Image (tube, grey):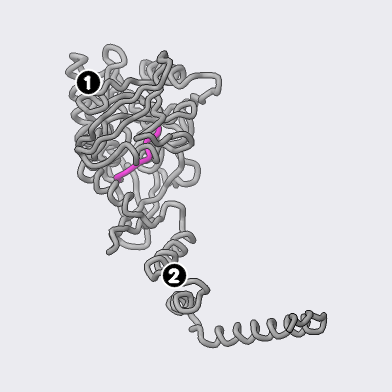
Amino acid sequence: MPPRPITLVSLIAAMALGVVLGVSAYWSLRATLPAPVGAALPIVIQAVRDSYVEPIEEDELVESAVLGILRGLDSHSAYLEVDEVEGMREEDAGQFGGIGVEIRFVDGYITVVAPIAGTPAAAAGLQAGDAIIEVDGRSLEGRTVRDAVADLRGAPGTGLTLGIRRPGEPAPLHVELVRKAIPIRTVRSRLLEPGYGYLRIAEFQRQTPVDVRAALERLVAEAGTALEGLVVDLRNNPGGVLGASVDVADAFLKQGLIVYTEGREEASEGRFEASGEDLLGGAPVAVLINGRSASAAEVVAGALQHHRRAVVLGTPSYGKGSVQTVLPLANRRALKLTTAHYYTPDGRSLADAGIQPDVAVPFTPDATRDEYDQLLLATALRELKRG
């Protein structure tokens, strides 16, 4: 028998029946849902698990529910995947498996800033300016610095091959390396000129305050006398451990409030005061910031700026005024949850506008990165010598 043709009357009847069934199902579902919205969550999960058109694994379903909850919060609360949790553990341990190279994104390429002395990268002859274009034959074109870091890191003892484009070389180079345990260095230092030091803090970890003190001692020893001024470079510093930033700010302050935090729980409330020690003995300080200076880096810049202990140069900071607590979960993942906000000593929320520099030194598109660095350091030295 050929299919019966669909008439206008039968189509309207089918649509009406669909509307009736939809309304009926809505009121039936509404009658079964408890009044509190939160109590609906297990019913929704069960309904999707039992009746959704395609089967979904329960772990996937619960994970989707967690992600949905966090999506409605601030951008800094997150569900951390296994690799992110492992990365945090590496930082806590103070080392990671890798090749020992500092990289950044330059002109569209993942580029070597400097190999770290005593590491596989240094032994293999990697140079500043080398563009890493491949890892084990996989192109890095279009990938982020974070993607590249994930490829470069790995268990100590494992090998990898890098494709390198080096200025002046007609063809790409291929370099074989073996990963090893690389100590995490958050602090670097050097003398800019006699009596004037440079301190670069890449991020704030538990070891950072100890490393800052050691770096200052080395600078004084190298200078042969007390420093006349210090540049503290916090550019591209994403933050880190709040307590570490408090200790670093304390190293340059004799007295006063450094930062205070406010949250819903008593443990989230805190006021952090300077302990009375200034490792520089009052010598002037210049702090460099930019749009990627965030969180704990802003705590240091904001405290030193407020107490007129440092002149802040560069461009406005990121503006992250919140504290996150990490809660480990049973599936090797973790919950990172915002639990407090912090404020500069004069009550400014860093989330509002970040830290505004005292001396603006904008980056101009026609300048190279090196030219801008030289301009910024020259401006900082000029400010330090003014006292």
Find residue 219 and name its label: 1
User: In the visual, does 297 lie left or right of 356?
Assistant: left
User: In the visual, does 362 lie left or right of 208?
Assistant: right
Q: In the rendered view of the protein, which quadrant contains the C terminus?
A: top left
Q: Is residue 237 magenta?
A: yes
Q: Main secondary structure of the magenta part?
A: loop
Where is residue 223 shown, x and y percent of the image?
21, 15
Image point (37%, 28%), residue name: 163
Q: Amino acid at mark 2?
A: Ile
Residues at marks 2 and 1, CA–CA distance in whole angstroms: 60 Å
Where is residue 284 shown, x and y percent of the image?
32, 23
Q: Is residue 46 magenta?
A: no
Image point (68%, 86%), residue name: 20
Where is residue 265 shown, x and y percent of the image?
33, 62
- Residue position for label 2: 56
Q: Pick whichever, 66 or 362, lies toward us.
A: 66
Find residue 155 and name its label: none
Residue 32 versus residue 260 in the image, above or below: below
Instruction: Place residue 273 in its image quadrant.
Output: top left
Where is residue 336 shown, x and y percent of the image?
35, 56
Query: If you read the primary sequence from the N terminus, does the residue marked by circle 2 or circle 1 appear first?
Result: 2
Instruction: Place residue 82 in its image quadrant.
Output: bottom left
Residues packed near mark 2 inside 10 Å, few (<14), some (14 to 19) or many (20 plus)? few
Image point (38%, 17%), residue name: 381
Furthest residue in direction right, as rendered: 8
Boundaries of the magenta span: 236-241
Instruction: Place residue 169 in its image quadrant.
Output: top left
